[in-house]
Image (cartoon, grey):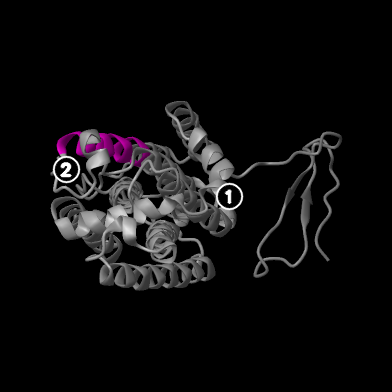
């Protein structure tokens, strides 16, 4: 057992556990503030009301994005994700990626059914709709995007991560622009996906580590750093917009200026985009270790009674096979001796040939 534990990435496992716990805590805080409190509901309401400004300019793009997100597209994307992992001969990766997509979407639907939104008199027009947190469309888009980051080959991972972040952000912002969801709905959906990404990564690490040592590929340092900085900048902009909106909460929404409404709406969009970027960046940060470049095959080894220690065959334990090469014409066999014995070759002829070629 001690041999099986040797070389385990305890730092990576601890990081994934802490990351998952932080994302669960973040979800709880978003739910509590924006659903359970009057202050949070009002901030969400102002941002959602501001989506009417400039809607005509983005309506076509928004409709295309949202119409492309469906159960059918989710199914097709899941099959493609699994196929990519399997053609790379990574069964654990295929299972983990599918687990991420399925777990995130089921969790979102369960939470949406269990969470109740109290009617605090903030948004009477939508009070009858009930709870809308987390966003199902955002969960579908983000879970597929993150799963693709996991299964893509290392050479395509950085570019794929940037595309995944843009797609997840675009889907989340589209739900706000269409008036389907509040900003907190999309942000909480992204946190659900992030939590399942950490869980799926942990699963992949544990399963692959049964093989023993693995070979890691290069990290996506530039893409991760770039995405992190951009996301933090977006979240800083969202915080400023949130602060400005908070200063006018004592004013009736109908009396707010267009600039204030747009600032609230833009702040919500920036918050969604920034969260999406950080979620993908957190996956890029560890994916080169979660999905290593080389995973050796399992080999049973019970010599030392180590029942938990299947490990790869060392290079020195591989069997050596030698072949005797015969001359099809003269049926002569060539024997190469060591330098200590002879520095030339001795050619041994068949018994019926009395001639022997001696060295020197």
Residue 295, disc: none
Please report the residue visible at 51 percent of the width from the left and 65 percent of the height from the top. 220
Magenta run includes residue 108: yes
Q: Nearer the viewer, residue 237 or 273?
A: 237
Percent x, y of residue 256? 35, 62
Outermost residue toward the top?
Answer: 72
Using a 10 Å C-alpha cutoff, classify the residue at mark 1 as few (fewer than 14 neighbours), some (14 to 19) or many (20 or more).
Answer: few
Direction from residue 235 to residue 301 in the image, left or right: left
According to the picture, the residue beneath numbered tag 1 turns out to be: 57
Residue 117, disc: 2
Res. 258 visible in picture: yes
Mark 2: secondary structure: loop
Percent x, y of residue 211? 35, 48
Q: Nearer the viewer, residue 75 or 308?
A: 75
Please report the residue visible at 30 percent of the width from the left and 72 percent of the height from the top. 243
Direction from residue 121 to residue 255 in the image, left or right: right
Q: Which residues are magenta?
A: 100-114
Magenta run includes residue 39: no
């Amino acid at each position: 057992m001690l041999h099986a534990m040797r070389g385990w990435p305890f730092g990576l496992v601890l990081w994934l556990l802490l990351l998952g716990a932080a994302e669960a805590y973040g979800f709880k805080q978003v739910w509590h503030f924006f659903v359970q409190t009057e202050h949070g509901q009002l901030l969400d309401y102002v941002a959602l009301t501001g989506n009417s400004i400039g809607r005509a300019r983005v309506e076509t793009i928004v409709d295309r994005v949202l119409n492309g997100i469906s159960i059918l597209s989710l199914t097709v994307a899941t099959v493609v994700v699994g196929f990519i992992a399997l053609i790379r001969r990574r069964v654990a990766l295929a299972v983990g990626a599918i687990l991420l997509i399925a777990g995130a979407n089921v969790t979102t639907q369960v939470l949406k059914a269990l969470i109740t939104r109290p009617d605090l008199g903030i948004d009477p027009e939508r009070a009858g709709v009930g709870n809308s947190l987390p966003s199902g469309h955002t969960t579908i888009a983000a879970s597929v995007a993150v799963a693709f980051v996991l299964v893509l080959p290392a050479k395509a991972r950085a570019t794929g991560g940037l595309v995944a972040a843009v797609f997840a952000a675009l889907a989340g912002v589209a739900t706000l622009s269409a008036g389907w969801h509040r900003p907190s709905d999309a942000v909480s959906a992204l946190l659900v996906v992030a939590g399942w990404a950490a869980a799926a990564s942990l699963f992949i690490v544990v399963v692959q580590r049964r093989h023993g040592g693995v070979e890691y590929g290069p990290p996506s340092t530039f893409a991760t750093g770039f995405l992190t900085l951009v996301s933090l900048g977006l979240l800083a902009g969202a915080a400023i917009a949130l602060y400005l909106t908070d200063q006018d909460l004592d004013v009736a929404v109908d009396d707010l200026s267009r600039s204030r409404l747009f600032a609230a709406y833009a702040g919500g969009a920036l918050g969604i985009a920034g969260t999406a970027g950080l979620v993908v960046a957190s996956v890029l940060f560890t994916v080169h270790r979660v999905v290593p470049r080389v995973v050796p095959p399992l080999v049973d080894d019970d010599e030392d009674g180590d029942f938990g220690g299947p490990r790869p065959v060392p290079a020195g334990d591989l069997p050596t096979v030698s072949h005797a090469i015969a001359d099809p014409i003269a049926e002569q066999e060539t024997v190469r001796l060591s330098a200590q014995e002879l520095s030339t070759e001795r050619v041994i002829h068949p018994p019926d040939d009395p001639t022997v070629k001696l060295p020197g």
